[in-house]
Amino acid sequence: MSAYVIFIRERTLDQSELDLYAKMAGPSLDGLTIKFLAAYGHQEVLEGPVPEGVAIAEFPSMEEAMQ
């Protein structure tokens, strides 16, 4: 059964830390079967604070999502 992960970036406090994370994030997913269903596109926020970015990823199983 597929599992889904929602990544929410609320706000950036330190751009240099975000840049470092961005360099490391891609390679950390190597070898995993992951499909990004949405990534940092247009958002229509109905209530609550507007995040800087949102991504939704699909994994084949909960076990792979937890890796």
Image (spheres, helix red, strand yellow):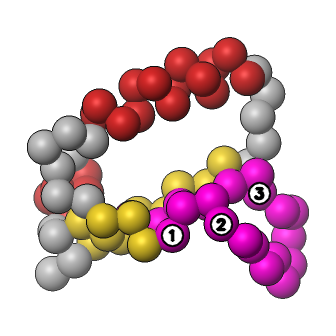
Q: Secondary structure at mark 2?
A: loop
Work out whether 16 lies above or below 44.
above
Which residue is under mark 3? 51
Which residue is under mark 2? 41
Mark 1, Cα crowd under 10 Å, few <14 / some 14-19 / many 20+, is few
Please name the residue shown 84% across and 62% down the image: 50
Q: Is residue 50 magenta?
A: yes
Frontmost of labels 2 and 3 is: 2
Is the C-beta separation of discs 2 and 1 under 8 Å? Answer: yes
Mark number, residue 38: 1
Highlighted magenta segment, given as a residue range: 38-57
Q: Earlier in the sequence, mark 1 or mark 3?
A: 1
Q: Secondary structure at mark 3?
A: loop
Q: Earlier in the sequence, mark 2 or mark 3?
A: 2
Callout 2 amino acid: Gly
Please name the residue shown 63% across and 59% down the image: 40
Does residue 61 appear left or right of residue 51 in this picture?
Answer: left
Does residue 51 appear left or right of residue 49 in this picture?
Answer: left
Mark 1 vs mark 3, CA separation in Å: 14 Å
Q: Secondary structure at mark 1?
A: strand
Frontmost of labels 1 and 3 is: 1
- Marks counted in the figure total 3
Mark 2, Cα crowd under 10 Å, few <14 / some 14-19 / many 20+, is few
Callout 3 amino acid: Pro
Tell me which corner region of the image, top left, top right, bottom left or bottom right, holds residue 16.
Answer: top right
